Image (tube, helix red, strand yellow):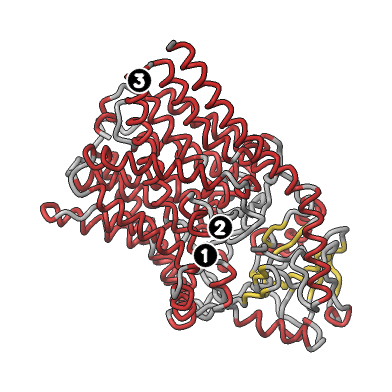
Amino acid sequence: MDADRRRPARDRLPLYVVAAAVTALVLAPLAAPGYALLYDMVFVPRQPLTWDLVAPAESLPRAVPMDAVVSLVTQLVPGWVVQRLVLGAAILLAAVGAGRLVPTERRGIRLLAAVGYAWTPYLAERLLIGQWGLLVAYAALPWLVRAALDLRAGRDGALARVVLIAAPAAITPTGGLVALGVVALLVPARERWRRSALAVAGVALLNAPWVTAALVTRAAGSSDPAGVAAFAARAENWAGPLVALAGTGGIWSAQATPASRAVPLVPLATLVLLVLAGAGVGLLRRRLPPGATVRLTVLAGAGFLLASLGVLPGGDAALRWAVVNLPGAGLLRDGQKFLAPYALLLVVCAALGAERLLGRVERVDRDMAGVVLVGLLLLPVAVMPDLAFGGAGRLRPVSYPADWRAVAGRVADDPGGQIVSLPLSAYRAYPWNSGRVVLDPAPRYLPGTVLTDDTLRVGDVAVAGENPRLRELRRVLAEGRPVAATGARWVVVQHHLAGGVDPATLAGLEVVHRGSFLTLYRNPAAPSGPVAPPPARWAVVAALGTALLVVLVAVFSALRRRATAW
Amino acid sequence: MRKALTLVVTGLVAAVLGILALGGLAAAATATEAEAVTEARNASEAAKRAGKQDPYAPEVYGNR
């Protein structure tokens, strides 16, 4: 890291060029206009700032404060621009961050780390399942590790940098926990206990919005234990789930796994990576400050343990018990997402292992060392070529049918009350989105509280959601009673989907808009007008304000240290 | 001698990368086309026979 700091900016140019090339290769389809809608990735032209996106009243805060941030940003910048900026920045900064973290004087080794960290199965799988908030945390991780080690070493301005880098990571609960883990493990030093405590407290406060939202929501704190097996790490090929995790893959979903991971030779590539990483550990220990490598290893080991818990003997039973009995333990059920620190350590060590290997080859022949370096640079791409071009075409932008804007406009003209999205289903496969499965966009597109199913279907297993209002709605629909009986103000029926809507369900409603894709009904019996938020939701706003204040203090602190602020 | 050795190593590296990339691309190509369609159809029919939820219904979050 010191080596990186001493380099002139010109020397870092190849790193940025390679990172930009990798980003362009992965996100090439996003050059076309529109929105890439895939699984959990939903962007809309202008996301309304609704209470339910800021502080969900009856569901778990899985996207707090991410949704509030997107709502605020899309008031100024269109959603399609935000999507490209976020995804582009995540991949670019992940690559550059990893390249700059490696303690080496050799440019080629930095490039190896950059390509290796931006072309991991972890990044591919979380991209293909649409969890861009996690990718932001993944990109922040190398920068955060660097800032945390700087703070431990007593460098000026490092405290502000730790907070400023942890802030984007903390837009999701998982990212916030990973950031807190990094800071709590890497920063504490007895001789600088005050700064250490400030850093840990600052990053803990960045987690306050989702923690507060979890405390005030009416949703059950416990989760369906069926989710443990459904979301446990998955084998990619003959080698089993632990080897898949060792290669930074192993997400639960077959659809989010690049098909190339099933190739029988992939475990051998993982073995090569592990051997290189093993060869590089010694160099890392010598080049980082004393104790830093051990702390990084503990962090990576904890991430790996959480990721593998669902497939370890006894681990699955412990996890099932935890998600039922410990409020918030549902966060751990898709444990593979905690693999990010392991992926970072693996890539950094493997890059240093490659440095040792190249050093030996160079003693025989310099040209041959160049060939080996190029080979190692291309290895991640060769092992998983189908991450290129948006996961071999899976990320493809589309335009929302005009119906969506019309329906959002009609609801905005007469605000208030809940909106029911039918047929009940958390995920949709629209013909205008080439049948790709995506989370129902209604809660993010429509200006109001949208009730959409929160049951997650994984194969033939239904993992129950936590929303008590939806349980009531499901009961009404199952009994064949009209949805008007639930007191919802609006009903949106989405056509061209599997599973129709029973006409009896729509009794007593009046059609407000009828389009090819959406029909909007109003319930004349439900009162209109804005609904006052319950006071508990203001606690979430206060937590958001506190997190923002922490960020602002860090910004001012960082600016004060510079001779010029720009 | 060194030149020959470099050429051999270059060939080996290219061959390994080529085999891996071709394998991956072939897997990606078949999995998204014929194989995937057949697999999905078989799984759907099996679920129907067993009276279970179709694992490839559009609203399904994913399959393991």
Viewer-side residue, A363 vs A513: A363
Label whose residue precedes the other's in the sequence (3 or 2)? 2
Q: Residue at x 77, y 61 (%)?
A: A407
Residues tagged 2 and 1 counted as in contact (Cβ below 8 A): yes
**Please, what is the three-letter code of the amino acid marked with disc 2?**
Ile
**Tag nearer the camera, 3 or 2:** 3
Q: Mark 2, mark 1: which one is toward the viewer?
A: 2
Q: Position of residue A330 (x, y in %)?
A: 49, 72
Q: Residue lying farthest left?
A: A191
Parent chain of label 2:
A
Position of residue A252 in the picture relative to residue A92 (left or right): right
Residue to which mark 2 is pinned: A251
Q: Quadrant of the image for the N terminus of chain A? A: top left
| Disc number placed over residue A334 in the picture, else none | 1
- Residue A193 visible: yes
Q: Earlier in the sequence, mark 2 or mark 1?
A: 2
Label 3 in the same subunit as label 2: yes
Which residue is the site of mark 3? A362
| A106 versus A62 height, above or below | above
Q: The disc labelled 3 sits on which kind of residue?
A: Glu
In the image, is residue A467 above or below residue B31?
A: below
Q: Which mark is residue A256?
A: none
The kind of residue on which mark 1 rests is Asp
Does any portion of residue A529 appear in the rendered image? no
